[in-house]
Amino acid sequence: MQDQIYDCTVIGGGAGGLSAGIYLQRFLLNSLILEKGKGRSVWIQNLTNYLGTAPETPAHKILKQGKEHYLSLNGNYLNGFAEEVFDEGEYFRIKVKTNKKQAEYREIKSKYLIAASGIIDLLPEMDNMRNVYDYAGYNLHVCMVCDGYEMKDKICGLFVNSDERIETALALKWFTSKIIVFTNNSFAISLERQAKLEKHNFKL
Ligand SMILES: Cc1cc2nc3c(=O)[nH]c(=O)nc-3n(C[C@H](O)[C@H](O)[C@H](O)COP(=O)(O)OP(=O)(O)OC[C@H]3O[C@@H](n4cnc5c(N)ncnc54)[C@H](O)[C@@H]3O)c2cc1C
């Protein structure tokens, strides 16, 4: 792997990165996907919004299929964390940590890069974080687009970390009117936002 220059390296082997990799191989390019493991999608215990999959399908099943598909097209896959990228002019040099415990590194060269590294959720600090993983995707949700429907007519606690985020309550109203906004006293709430919550009878 270290001796060649890939046409394109994709950082992230989630749904986005695997789709990119499959298309790169279908364009007869030599690509590599780097995946650090434990991505956000491992939390998805059942996918209820994907066309063509049974609602109880866990995301890891989709990713396994996607990886197999990518490898069947002669794609290259490396478990490792892309730690740094250097622009060397003709190619990018990517420093990849392949062993967390012993800090082993490899250097990958690639003409192009695709960043498909997803997003990171900012979760409220809790004493027992284990709960987050047990409930995530069932009654603890992080995305209104994916999971707003699951809140239909339910009593919903909305955890926000800034005054602006309070606006989410107004969008969530599409699914339920029973909303309690939690701020953990971590910021000042503007009068304007307080008035909006009161107008809709949302508790603060
Ligand atoms: C609890 C929960 C439930 C969800 N439910 C749904 C649902 O039902 N339906 C739905 O459509 N979406 C759902 N989502 C959203 C879902 O996470 C995204 O739709 C999907 O994962 C986005 O794919 P992605 O490839 O863009 O990003 P990700 O899946 O986040 O993939 C990015 C990948 O990049 C890797 N990565 C990041 N940085 C590096 C690095 N430096 N080096 C190497 N690898 C790296 C990560 O390990 C990860 O695997 C849910 C999310 C959560 C948290």
Image (cartoon, rainbow, N blue to C red):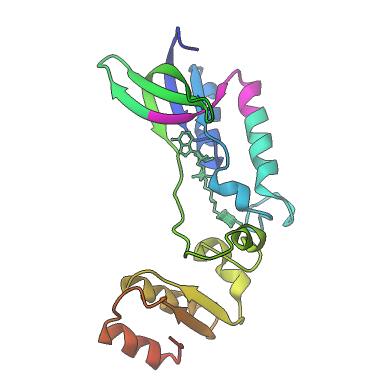
Classify residue 188 as left or right of residue 137: left
Q: Quick one: which residue is furthest to the top in this view?
A: 3
Which picture quadrant has residue 147?
A: bottom right
The image shows residue 59 at horizontal and vertical percentages of 65, 47
The answer to which of 24 and 58 lies nearer the viewer is 58
Q: Tell me if I can see residue 27 in this picture.
A: no
Give the total number of marks visible in the rendering.
0
Residue 176 falls within the magenta-colored stretch: no
Classify residue 203 as left or right of residue 178: left
User: Does residue 6 sit above or below 36 in this rendering?
Assistant: above
Residue 73 falls within the magenta-colored stretch: yes
Which picture quadrant has residue 72?
A: top right
The answer to which of 64 and 105 lies nearer the viewer is 105
The image shows residue 146 at horizontal and vertical percentages of 55, 61
Classify residue 156 as left or right of residue 87: right
**Residue at image coords 37%, 71%:** 165
Which picture quadrant has residue 19?
A: top right
Q: Tell me if I can see residue 119 in this picture.
A: yes
**Residue at image coords 74%, 56%:** 56
The image shows residue 14 at horizontal and vertical percentages of 55, 40
User: Does residue 30 sit above or below 63 in this rendering?
Assistant: above
Which residues are drawn in magenta? 69-83
User: Does residue 174 sit above or below 199 in this rendering?
Assistant: above
**Residue at image coords 57%, 21%:** 75
The answer to which of 204 and 100 lies nearer the viewer is 100
**Residue at image coords 39%, 92%:** 198
The image shows residue 204 at horizontal and vertical percentages of 43, 86
User: Does residue 15 sit above or below 160 in this rendering?
Assistant: above
